Image (spheres, grey):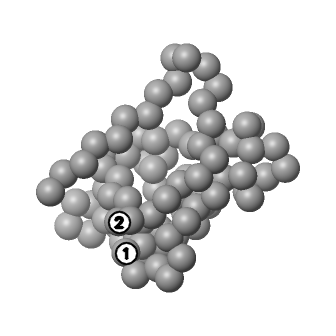
Amino acid sequence: MTGTGTQTDPYIVSTLADLRTAVGTAGAYVEMDPDASTKILDLNGSATNPVTQRLDINCASLAGNGWRIRNLYFSSPSDHFLVSTTT
């Protein structure tokens, strides 16, 4: 992971471990690595039981940069994930 997490120098991440750290930081600005050769993050491949995987997102901004996050599960109707796009 690179960057300092500010709006002008966001965290740049390309692994699940780095993503967890970056998006778990309140107020941080995060970008998935725009220069990565493979832009797929598969949560199913990260553990024996993917349903137990948890991704707490507390950051100010997360730029996907064309990445796909696969096998993201929600454990209850009250769980939610907001995706918005900006140009």
Q: At which x and y percent is residue 57?
A: 46, 41
Residue drawn at 54 percent across, 76 percent down:
38
Q: Earlier in the sequence, mark 1 or mark 2?
A: 1
Residue at horizontal 74 percent and vertical 44 percent from the top: 50
Please, is residue 57 above or below residue 22 in the view?
above
Crowd around label 1: few <14 · some 14–19 · many ≥20 (10 Å): some
Residue at image location 55% in from the left, 17% down from the top? 77
Question: Is residue 80 shown above or below 37?
Answer: above
From this viewpoint, which residue is outermost toward the left?
87
Instruction: Classify residue 87 as left or right of residue 74.
Output: left
Note whether residue 27 is visible. Answer: no
* Amino acid type assigned to the residue bearing label 1 in the image: Pro
Q: Is residue 36 left or right of residue 54?
A: left
- Rendered residue at 55%/65% (across/down): 40
Farthest top residue in view: 77
Kindly identify the amino acid type of the residue bearing the numbered disc 2. Asn
Confirm whether residue 70 shows in the render: yes
SS label for mark 2 = loop
Q: Nearer the viewer, residue 27 or 31?
A: 31
Q: Are marks 1 and 2 in contact (CB under 8 Å)?
A: yes
Pointer 2: what residue?
A: 65
Specify few, some or many for label 2: CA neighbours under 10 Å numbering under 14, 14-19, or 20 or more.
few
Mark 1 lies on a secondary structure that is: loop
65 left or right, relative to 50: left
| Residue labelled with disc 1 | 34
- Residue 27 in percent (x, y) is at 32, 46
Q: Is residue 72 above or below residue 38?
A: above
Where is residue 34 shown, x and y percent of the image?
37, 75
